[in-house]
Amino acid sequence: MVVPICYAFDGNYFFTPIDEKPKSVAAGDLKRVRNIKANSRVALVIDHYSEEWRELAYVLVSGEAEIIEPAAGDSEHARAVTLLREKYRQYRSMAIDQRPIIRIAPRRVKCWPRAS
């Protein structure tokens, strides 16, 4: 399953929220959440597109995902919310602090073109 995401990276983990955009099911019943609970291995592709094809680039991150539920005193969830709100102004008015966040721990990174 491929799902476009908004993410923040803290140098160790990628974080992406289950935000308030309209969903047809509850957060815990979303296909991506069920998939992670069944198999935590995930891939994240971050690309750079350009009309000048010599400038095309991507990073492929293979990793392990975990669902972080909002809980009183959970500093990792709070830090993820802060990072996401700093990066995306749209999240500043959403209650992502009260919703699950997906944490991705990178295990392998592949870049193209390869750095020289």
Image (tube, grey):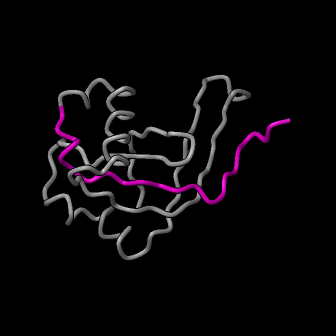
Count of marks overlaid on the render: 0
Q: Quadrant of residue 19?
A: top left
- 40 lies above or below 44: below
Picture coordinates of residue 68, whole percent (x, y):
32, 57
- In this view, which residue lies farthest toward the front? 73
- Between 64 and 71, the one lying in front of the other is 71
Q: Residue at x 36, y 54 (%)?
A: 102
Q: Which residues are magenta?
A: 94-116
Residue 53 horizontal side relative to residue 106, left or right: right
- Between 40 and 44, the one lying in front of the other is 40
Residue 22 horizontal side relative to residue 107, left or right: left
Image quadrant in which the C terminus is located: top right
Q: Is residue 98 magenta?
A: yes
Picture coordinates of residue 6, whole percent (x, y):
38, 39
Picture coordinates of residue 83, whole percent (x, y):
39, 34
- Between 81 and 25, the one lying in front of the other is 81
- In this view, which residue lies farthest toward the right? 116
Q: Quadrant of residue 65?
A: bottom left
Picture coordinates of residue 84, whole percent (x, y):
36, 34
Q: Residue at x 66, y 32 (%)?
A: 56
- 82 lies above or below 77: above
Q: Residue at x 26, y 53 (%)?
A: 100
Image quadrant in which the N terminus is located: bottom left
Q: Quadrant of residue 97?
A: top left
Residue 80 horizontal side relative to residue 13, left or right: left
Q: Is residue 59 magenta?
A: no
- Between 108 and 56, the one lying in front of the other is 108
